[in-house]
Amino acid sequence: MTDYMTNLRVKLPATCIILEIIIIILFATLVEYDHDTDAKHWHEEMSKHNKTDYENEFYFRYPSFQDVHVMIFIGFGFLMTFLQRYGFSSVGFNFLIAAFSLQWATLMQGFFHGMHNGKIHIGVESMINADFCTGSVLISFGAVLGKTSPVQLLLMAVFEVTLFAVNEFILLSVIGARDAGGSMTIHTFGAYFGLTVARVLYRPQLDKSKDKSTSVYHSDLFAMIGTIYLWMFWPSFNSAITAHGDDQHRTAMNTYYSLAACTLATYGFSALVSHEGKLDMVHIQNAALAGGVAVGTAGEMMLTPFGSMIVGFIAGTISTLGFKYLSPILEEKLRIQDTCGVHNLHGMPGVLGAIVGAITAATATKEIYGDGLADVFPDLTGGNKITASFQGVRQAISLAVTLGIALLGGLIVGFILKLPIYGSPPDTTCYEDSIYWEVPGEEGGHEEMTTVPVEDVAKPLNG
Amino acid sequence: MTDYMTNLRVKLPATCIILEIIIIILFATLVEYDHDTDAKHWHEEMSKHNKTDYENEFYFRYPSFQDVHVMIFIGFGFLMTFLQRYGFSSVGFNFLIAAFSLQWATLMQGFFHGMHNGKIHIGVESMINADFCTGSVLISFGAVLGKTSPVQLLLMAVFEVTLFAVNEFILLSVIGARDAGGSMTIHTFGAYFGLTVARVLYRPQLDKSKDKSTSVYHSDLFAMIGTIYLWMFWPSFNSAITAHGDDQHRTAMNTYYSLAACTLATYGFSALVSHEGKLDMVHIQNAALAGGVAVGTAGEMMLTPFGSMIVGFIAGTISTLGFKYLSPILEEKLRIQDTCGVHNLHGMPGVLGAIVGAITAATATKEIYGDGLADVFPDLTGGNKITASFQGVRQAISLAVTLGIALLGGLIVGFILKLPIYGSPPDTTCYEDSIYWEVPGEEGGHEEMTTVPVEDVAKPLNG
Amino acid sequence: MTDYMTNLRVKLPATCIILEIIIIILFATLVEYDHDTDAKHWHEEMSKHNKTDYENEFYFRYPSFQDVHVMIFIGFGFLMTFLQRYGFSSVGFNFLIAAFSLQWATLMQGFFHGMHNGKIHIGVESMINADFCTGSVLISFGAVLGKTSPVQLLLMAVFEVTLFAVNEFILLSVIGARDAGGSMTIHTFGAYFGLTVARVLYRPQLDKSKDKSTSVYHSDLFAMIGTIYLWMFWPSFNSAITAHGDDQHRTAMNTYYSLAACTLATYGFSALVSHEGKLDMVHIQNAALAGGVAVGTAGEMMLTPFGSMIVGFIAGTISTLGFKYLSPILEEKLRIQDTCGVHNLHGMPGVLGAIVGAITAATATKEIYGDGLADVFPDLTGGNKITASFQGVRQAISLAVTLGIALLGGLIVGFILKLPIYGSPPDTTCYEDSIYWEVPGEEGGHEEMTTVPVEDVAKPLNG
């Protein structure tokens, strides 16, 4: 079942070890503890500014960081275990590329978002940002799931993290957009980058693996672990790097209500469009999360609770309808084989979130925000202040820039990944763990094995 | 397998969408950010009262909120996956009715617990309270699990949330009881309401689905995910809305020790009463949690750690014995088919918790609580102060009121739910996902499917 | 399948109930709320020292506590579910002995680490310490997994918790070592204690259960839940009891980067040494965690991010190679049957962590730490100050003491546990749930059962 091509005995170790050595050298040269993590500086800070320990950034953000961390490793990892024979790879490759990406993102985001005397300063906020960037890579992973080798995925992460940091820098620092929960920087970017890569890697013969591209009963339950964790902790995701106080509080709450409304829309439309009025696990596992994506930009703004609900409701609706009607078209006409349907969960809801953010920003007033305006829209106050409408324009431009960089970047990276040197699986063995993993029950693996996976048992009975 | 009756193509979408639209309209009319979530008000608050950002309620309660959130969606959801063919519904309907209930609860609790100039103010505390109320609905769901359609469940939630808010209002605001962890408001109410509904919905022919009412090996492991999360985060549940400082701290610790003692009692009595001294998963999955229920009222009081342990030990004991000896009687004599045994986990331990709370309150003194008395028992200090014994009487009356409202409410709602218009499953197909879900491996679902669930494989071999 | 010997109807209830009664009596006599949990004392504290509620220790440590709690109950519990027929026992016995150990640890650590007027004071910090001590017991559990009865495990916990507290007292209070994340006190101690017990309990005929000692597809996925939770929350584990402010912040971040680097090393070396370049789940599930163990001592120090990565990388490498090359030798030559490979995950990385800690301590200067030196190394400042090199010597001595107490203690306890009175399983039925649990699908259990576990289905087809 395994031929020379997919044997990674040299390629994967070389890739992992070389990348880690490069990272360690760059960290040694360039990275320092920031003022809240460095023993000396924090104590200087405390005596100079009369601060106390509970003002350390750690206490404002670490609980949110941990929730985000769970979303990245459990949420994304288990969400993708829905495939019947790809659970090891879903959780395991997710684990690998996330562990790599968060290190690489620390460096790339550090380069682009300001060095301090030639050094990158890190602390809990950079950890959250690194996890965010990782999230974007994992979204793209969802589009190519089952059709790529871990070496390809690591390489994709190298490029995608870099482009993410460039795009984020342009949006937040050059254009001056606001995007705390990453509707644009994370979701739109990750989705359209990944979809473009999937387009370039199009496999006309993928039907040969079709029997493995579906779920089984237990794999769908494992996937629900991922779904529910993403759903529960999304309020922490969107609020993790907003300003202290009311901003974190409001963002979390807006996201909470957006997701709740989104869930009702998803169940409603799933039953409406499915076979015999039955609910479809694909919708529940994915579309119910679209409400979190869609308030990623506007969540920190004074969107109001009912405004959040309307956004969530629309997001759940378009996401469910996307799975039903748009995904087949994307595959047949545009030749985009989007394994997890990231276009429905991250693509369209991300664009929706960007638009909602632009509109909400354009309607901001001092009346509504009071002195809190400076936290949400720093450029609307102070010396060189701009108008709210102009902030809205910035947001809209940012969406266009994000789409452009994602599509162009995905195109180039797609062609790099298309080279036949990374051990990617043959068309007949996509969505299959045993190509990269020692799978219990395989011949030759364990001589004394008396068990076989459910699927193999079933074949002789049904076939 | 599916006939017109259980086809929800119209009913479920209509219910979800109409309910969500009503909620959005009511939120638009009635709900506002509270002073800690509103940009303008929080900044006014900070300058007026010389507050700093870390005094925002968010930092006191958001980590607890997230733990409670995990209990509601993962804890309850997976606890109910023990049934072999009802995992999609357990997690999925739990998800749906919880997402609905938390929105509806925000409104109902807002109505009853004080409007501010005609507006309901919301923030992290209202989010916790909404999750609490949702917990009560999910307890009732446990009693009717496998025998109800999602439309029925949503309707039950509409009524139960409303009655919950009424009961909570009477207990906390009219009578002046204390019940931070909800032994009465959440557990006793949810259990006896649900049991009464189950009684009204009694199915004499339920034996026809008996083969699906048991667990299989993997479904029991999924259920343990639910159990362990509920167990771990119960300290956060009971302490989530207690007063700041020592109160939250003490409540969490009392719950921690109560649960630990409860677990030893559960294992001990499970081995004692089971077949050949073997442990029974049903006991471990459920009775080990009774210690959290039983300190729901007294947890915030000066119960002492060993007092908490005694309560937990008793709770684990009665809960395990209840599963063994009382549940069969309830089913045979009282005709209550309590799928998850909520009477043993929430009913009896809830009543125990109420009694323990009454006794602990009645023995409170300024000696023991010092200036902390005002936090736990506001009415025992100040102008119109009452005696501790009277506080105990209040607690006892509250238990009686809760039981009354739960039983009467459950009776009425049960008859409403009995109408044959909600697509509830026939007696032969209870505890079965495929009636409401597209289940992988089903005929007609996926033509190319080469897998069947374990159970179906097993039949020809064993049958 | 079950004979008198393994029937626990009397032994297990007696053990559980007697132990719990002893604990309750000791708590009643000896344990009190500390000043942050006691209503009266905290309010006195606030008025005396002009403190505010958010200075309560609860807010500094409770989120970390909950993360540690998840590691203990979900992390350890599910990590061990990899065995195909031992999932109930893995999660269930983990649950039982953890619930017991945390109570017993509160007492033992309280005795040794300072009584206040004859009373043990407890709060969130003692809860974390109790969970830490429990972690050590669970590590030892990993070494004997599948070969011991729950009565044996409880007895092991009684002794191990006691010895843990003695060792911890010698290290931290007598010698003056630093070990916030427990590379020595938790990991080295737990591993070598457990391995020695496993050596004494050596079963020459264990091959008879060999068919059950491997994993199946789904059991490996359940185990990944444990792995990922341990991995994600390890930063909270190592930082849970470090000093406030920069210390907690820095420790969490060092651990985060150590684990990330460790993961890349693990994937690289797993593919390098495995069959056909495939990844081995055993490595991923375990070795990827070694980076957390290895910065348990030095994590709170100014290890630098790249220093943490180097340590993590080495830890992942030796752990993976240990699974591949050392474990078979330990079993064949030293007759240590280490079920979970705790020597590779906790033993060697723990020793590595102790050495890294000694070196990092020996190179500490006021230059680097500034005023923060007093938090990390109190004895390097103040009146009777010592040199950094001497602190390094203390650390090294502590490692030797830990190994000595673990080996000697494990030897004695091993012989106590070898007595044939605890209902331990016969050689033919190790790694098998059905000996201690009612397992669904067993004959006599459920007459109407139409399902059998996957494994049993497979036999007639393959055999």
Image: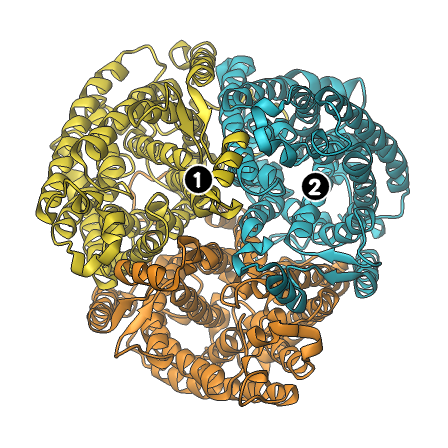
Chain colours: A cyan, B yellow, C orange
Q: Residues within 10 Å of mark 1 (few under 14, many from 20)?
A: many
- Label 1 to label 2: alpha-carbon separation: 25 Å
- A381 sits left or right of C94 in the view: right
Residue under label 2 = A138
Q: Residues within 10 Å of mark 2 (few under 14, many from 20)?
A: many
Residue B455 place in picture, x, y as percent? 44, 37
- C370 sits left or right of B291 in the view: right
Residue under label 1 = B69
Residue appearing at x 58%, y 56% in the figure = A56
**Which is nearer the eye, A449 or A277?**
A277
Residue A463 place in picture, x, y as percent? 60, 32
**Which is nearer the eye, C336 or C408?**
C408
Residue C1 visible (yes or no): no
Residue appearing at x 26%, y 33% in the figure = B190
Q: Quarter holding the N terminus of chain B?
A: top left
Residue B386 place in picture, x, y as percent? 12, 43
